[in-house]
Image (cartoon, helix red, strand yellow):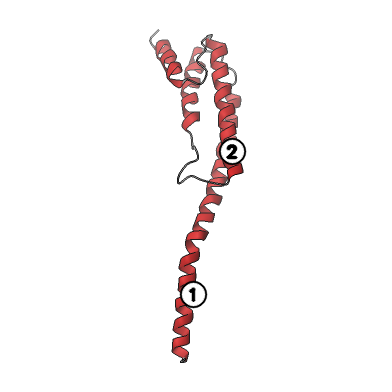
Amino acid sequence: MSKRLKIAVVIAVSALAVAALVPLGWHRFEAWAVGIHQKSTTRELAAWEQEFSQIRTTDEAIRAVGMLRSVQDYYVPGPGYRSDSATEDALQEQRRRTSTTIARALEEFTGERHGLDVEKWDAWRDGQRHK
């Protein structure tokens, strides 16, 4: 085999190896980056849980209803937004705690018993705005 042919084969094999490994490397990088974002989102949800754990005014309750809706849809893991299962589980558990805390605070302030039913809380909020 000539020297040129050997070089051409090495270059071709190297190019194929790189082409095969790039998607794997990208997938790992993407999962790593999403994991960082999901951990940040988990901390943000925890801060919201603390912020909305007590409601003292109707204005705060109205804001809490909007937050309850937002928390349920805020960066939910799914296609195109995946990380490792431990990070995703922690995020979803924090989402559950935050939603439950906000709903409990709303119930304590308003006397209504709507739990996590955002549609019913929206109706309550709309009634407050028209008073």
Residue in the image at 44% along x and 77% along y:
12
Q: Name the quadrant containing residue 4.
A: bottom left
Secondary structure of residue under mark 1:
helix
The residue that disc 2 covers is: 89
Residue found at the very far left of the displayed protein: 130
The residue under the point 59% across, 38% down is 89
| Residue 63 in sight from this viewpoint | yes
Up-down relation of residue 130 to residue 63 (above or below): above
Q: Which residue is mark 1?
A: 14
Which picture quadrant has residue 42? Answer: top right
Say if residue 52 shows up in the picture: no
Q: Residue furthest front?
A: 1
Which residue appears at 49% of the width and 75% of the height?
A: 14
Spot occupied by residue 82 in the image (x, y as percentages of width and height): 51, 45
Q: Residue 128: give x, y in percent of width and height.
A: 43, 11
Which residue is more in the foreground, 24 or 121?
Answer: 24
Helix, strand or loop at disc 2? Answer: helix
Is 54 placed left or right of 128 in the picture? right
In the picture, the disc for residue 49 is none
